[in-house]
Amino acid sequence: MKYAGLLVMPAGFFLSIAALVLFPAPVPQAAFVLCGLAVECLGLVVAVRAHMEARGESRP
Amino acid sequence: MNSQAALPITEATFALTLALLLLAPLAIAGVAFINTGLGRSRSAAQTLLGGLAILAASAIVFALIGATWAGSAGAAGHTFQVAGKPWDWLGKGPLLLSGLSAAPAHSQLALLFEFMAVAMAALIPWGSGADRLRLSAGCAIAAVLAAVVFPLLTHWVWADGWLAQLGVNFSLGAGFLDGSGAATVHVLGGLSALAVVWITGPRTGKFPKEGLSTALPGHNAVYVLFGCLLALVGWLAWNVAGAVLWLHAPLSALPVTAVNTLLSASGALAATFTVTRIRFGKPDASMCANGWLAGLVASCACAGVVTPAESFFVGLVAGIATPLLVELLELALSIDDPSGAITVHAVGGLWGLLAAGIFAPQPGQLVAQLVGIATLLGLVLPLVYFLFRLLDRVVAFRVDPDGERIGMDLHELGGGAYPEFVIHRDESYR
């Protein structure tokens, strides 16, 4: 799951970059960049949760 | 940072910036002391020697490989076209620093700055891996950062790369602003620290099966607080030199940059002092040190572009967030980060970058900063994690259990840092 989370994060980055190219108007551009960041945060949350579960299983 | 074609600088500016850059290693020394103090007594010599070794490894690898890829402002880079816009993604500098003495003054100073920056970035994850990260692994991590990740990021931000060109190509303010390395040094270092902690795992006994995590306090609060004082001197020099080199600030703007740096750190210390006093009844020395450092880190991004009042506010927020996040990471997320680098450098740096966007006067600056933050989180963190995962297969990051039990000093160096002192028994191995 950690890998899945980390692979979602570049998707958010490309969404942010796509916003620059696709939306010249400032408001939709900013909204899409924020969406990209939200996707990255989602990926980070998945990665962190996977780390917590792995730690829970390996506690002595 | 619009096009940063190497500007001619006067002799006075050259001399001042060079003098400041010669003081900047004090920031590295400060962080090395903080890392050592926050670790355990039986790993103290290994931690401080590791700081030196990492500085050396990063300098050698950056000179051999990294400086070529980082390139310099005003020089051509590797570019591709998307939607009619140029995306400069990799530098094309001279090999092995050839022709450095004949390079423009700005390029020479920029390269010196980058040598300091790469050493600092590589030192940050070393503190997070304290007490279980092997010395050879620390040097290998420094080499990977200096050869691959730091040059890429440096080129994008400081050498006319695509992030610096966001203002020119997409009318986003002045492009991505990073006055003194909040992104290229601190967020990179902090995210590398997260990757290292994920890969090495916690110190033995840190998270027992039953109950809360075990407290493993730093062994020397004096080192930690002395490191903070050293760091202040280095940071003042670092931020002012960065303002000259990367923001092209006039000499008259430099005192304000220094005042902003001091105010940000002071606001952060005041906030952490208050928060820990309210939460624990007394102020916590190591947490206050982390708060102070978080204020300095946040100032890296914005000291050159905000007013003193705004800088104080930036520090205040960093200082409030630091103790809360350190607790969250340890207690809720099972992340064992002895030096607090993930909170201090990654989160502090990200907050500074965001604050620069919020307070900068240019329209579109906030979006430019958000794109930079998206790059750091979405591209740099996965890249660093996967590179370190591969590296861990070649040079094992974590010491064996016996080595961790007897301490990194005895295991890796054959002698302790404090041979005349009796080391108390280890509570974590009951």
Image (spheres, coloured by chain):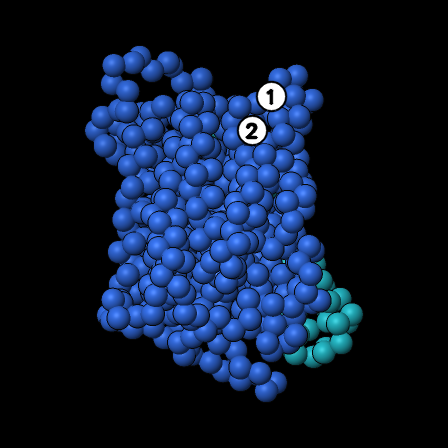
Chain colours: A cyan, B blue
Q: Can residue B361 be seen in the rendering of this structure?
A: yes
Q: Quadrant of residue B27?
A: top left
Mark carried by residue B23 = none
Which amino acid, by three-letter code, is at mark 2?
Cys
The tally of labels here is 2
Query: Mark 2 belongs to which subunit?
Result: B
Q: Chain of mark 1?
A: B
Residue marked by disc 1: B283
Q: Foreground: B101 or B121? A: B101
How far across and how far down the image is residue A18, in percent?
65, 75
Left or right of B124: which side holds A16? right
- Point 37% across, 13% down: residue: B424
Image point (41%, 69%), residue name:
B8
Q: Please check whether the numbered discs 2 and 1 fall on a single chain.
A: yes
Q: Earlier in the sequence, mark 2 or mark 1?
A: 1
Which residue bears the numbered disc 2? B288
Please report contact status of discs 2 and 1: CB closer than 8 Å, yes or no.
yes
Identity of the amino acid at label 1?
Answer: Pro
Considering the numbered disc 2 on the image, is that residue within a helix, a strand or a loop? Answer: helix
Task: Decide: is B264 above or below B410.
Answer: below
